[in-house]
Structures are given as C-alpha cells and as structure tokens.
Amino acid sequence: MGIVATRHWHQIEDGRLQCDVCPRACKLRDGQRGLCFVRARDGERIVLTTYGRSSGFCVDPIEKKPLNHFLPGTPVLSFGTAGCNLGCRFCQNWDISKSRQMDTLADAASPEGLAEAAQRLGCSSVAFTYNDPVIFMEYAVDVADACRERGIRAVAVTAGYVCDEPRREFFAHMDAANVDLKAFSESFYARTCSGHLRPVLDTLEYLRHETDVWFEITTLLIPGLNDSDEEIDRMTNWVVDRLGRDVPMHFTAFHPDYKLRDRPPTPPATLARARSIAIANGVRFAYTGNVHDRTGASTYCGGCGALVIQRDWYQLGRYNLTDDGRCRSCDTPLPGVFAGPPGNQGPRRQPVRLAPPLA
C-alpha cells in the first residue's frame, strides 16, 4: 500500500507528464506533485501516493452524505484521504482536503480489509468523502469492487471535477453519488474555487443520461456569493430541464471557515427560500441542511404529497413507504434506491480504527 501506478496521463512535447484525471491538467516534472497533492510524477509515470491510506474511518448515517433517497436510515462506513483538486476558499473539511502533511493519513486498510470491516460493522455502504475521491480513484475503485463482492454499495461524495475518460471509469464502480454543485456561475467557480463550472455540469448530465448511478445534488449557500434568487432560479431551472424533476437537491448552510471567515453563517430563511424556488420551478424533492428544519429535511410523495419519510436531523420518524419504496397512501414510487425496511442508524456517529498508526 502507498504508491501505485496510474494510467490517466500522457507525455507532452517538453517532456513533462500531464495528468488527465481532472480539468486542471497538471504538467509535472520528475518529483513534482499535482495541485491535488496525492498524484505525483515518479520517473516516467504518474503515481497515486496515498493508496490504502486514510485520514480516518467513521460509521455515519447515510443521510449525512447527504443522501435522502438511498437506503434510508442505514449506516455507511465513511473515509477519505488527503488533498483536493479544487481550491475552495470556504472548504468545510480543509484540515483534510487541504492537507500537505502525510501524517494526516493516520489509518490504513486494504480494499479487502475495508470491505470486511464494513460488513463486520453492519454497514450497507461505504462512502468516499471528506476529500474528493476522483483524486484517489484507483483506491476508491478497488474498494468499491471489494465491497460489491460482499453486497455492500459504494457512494462517492464528489465535486464532479473530472475529465471524461476517468469519469466513466470511476462511476462505473459506484452505486450512488452526492455531487457538490457549488454555484451556478463561472465567476464563482473561478474566483472562489479555482475551477470551472462546465465540467461539473458535464458530470451531472453524464450521471443522469449515461449511468444508473443514483445521485443527489448539494449546494452550500454562502451569503452574498451564490445565494441570490436569480442564481438559484437559474440553477434549479437547469436541473429540471437537463436532469429532470426527480433529482433531489439539498441546500445547506455555510459557516465561516478556512479562508472565508468574513461571511456570516447562512440564515435558515435563505435555505427555505431556495427550497421554495426549487419547488416552484418543478424540483420534486428539495431539502434544507445543516439547520434544524423538520419540514425541509423530510420527504413528501411526488404523487399525492403525503409525508413519506419524516426526519429530525438524521433521526427518521414516520416512514410511509413500502419495502420497495412506494408511497403507502397512493402507491407512487419514490425515486431512489430502497431495499427493505429503513435502518435505525439515527444520528449515531462512530469513529473506527482499522489499523495501527502508520510509521
């Protein structure tokens, strides 16, 4: 474990190797690392330097990803590595995603060991989260395959900032995803994330039209930057037009962090307003997050409007769905992935140690 060869790169005319995993297209001389920190040039190849290493493992409720239409109430084994291929000034996991210290990776597990642990802990899925899994895709893919052999699903929590070929390879191994659509303007992505909007939209359209991966969208609303009625209106109209009405959207509250401490926390009223705009534009399943809002966290039938999954934070209450995800009031199927009765994970969060500290 540690360093493994990768294949999404090519040599350019001046002798440097260009990484082709994401649109950043880092061009590396021997010994250099990409902006993500974890992909590096080693001689005449680009390698992943963090295979099998993690910043920590934790059993979470699946709703924390957030995924509200994927195996409700079940536990998910969550983990990440270090580094990121975007430069978001507001990063809420900056101590992991912006880490340049290998001692952040204090835990380890082989794909088979991780799958065994997920099964032993009673998890229905594993989630690649905390930092973006596309930058450690070789490890994530192997973990997903090992888990699939045990009937355990794989979840990617991602910004979707990835090129076409690795996008296809990566998501071929995933069962579900939450895609972070950070805003709906190129200027926000350029100034606040050091990236571009178009590749993220391409990922969303790819997931919707070319895969069976269940996915939901999250947007962190930051006061004065991406929370205007006009931007939310354009975003939600695009989702309905290009992805359909049944893709769940989560509007979540920002808190000052990392390099964006001069903005106030997002008022709950902003989230409620965004949810209302989404619903008015035809989004059937719009949610609020990072605030206590039972109405905004709960799920309502797209057919008759009945409450079908009641949520109080991550605790499920009333559950009015059949085992295969149909409304008990009108028999309308709820879009998503359902397999039997809901789990009872609730809000419990359990840190897990899978290996001794690495030297």
Image (tube, rainbow, N blue to C red):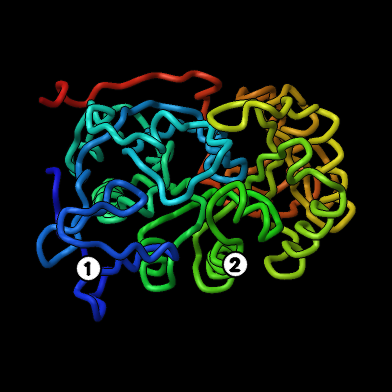
Q: Given the image, on which type of amino acid does mark 1 rest?
A: Arg
Q: Given the image, on which type of amino acid does mark 2 rest?
A: Arg
Q: Quadrant of residue 357?
A: top left
> At which x and y percent is residue 83?
36, 42
* Quarter of the rendering occupied by the C terminus: top left
Q: Is residue 297 left or right of residue 35?
A: right
Pick whichever, 358 or 243, lies toward us: 358
C-alpha distance separating marks 1 and 2: 24 Å
Q: Is residue 326 left or right of residue 74?
A: right
Q: Residue at x 35, y 37 (%)?
A: 80
* Quarter of the rendering occupied by the N terminus: top left
> At which x and y percent is residue 272?
84, 35
Circle 1 SS class:
loop
Q: Is residue 207 left or right of residue 255?
A: left
Residue 100, label in figure? none
Instruction: Name above or below for residue 78 compared with residue 195.
Output: above
Task: Name which of mark 1 and mark 2 comes first in the sequence.
Answer: 1
Residue 198, label in figure? 2
Residue at the far bottom in the pictured view: 13
Circle 2 SS class:
helix
Residue hosting label 1: 7
Label 2: few (<14), some or many (≥20) within 10 Å? some
Q: How many marks?
A: 2
Q: Residue at x 31, y 28 (%)?
A: 56
Instruction: Name above or below for residue 169 compared with residue 254.
Output: below
Residue 96 seen from this side? yes
Q: Residue at x 62, y 40 (%)?
A: 68
Instruction: Name above or below for residue 353 compared with residue 40.
Output: above
> At which x and y percent is residue 127?
41, 41
Instruction: Name above or below for residue 290 compared with residue 150.
Output: above
Q: Residue at x 37, y 40 (%)?
A: 126
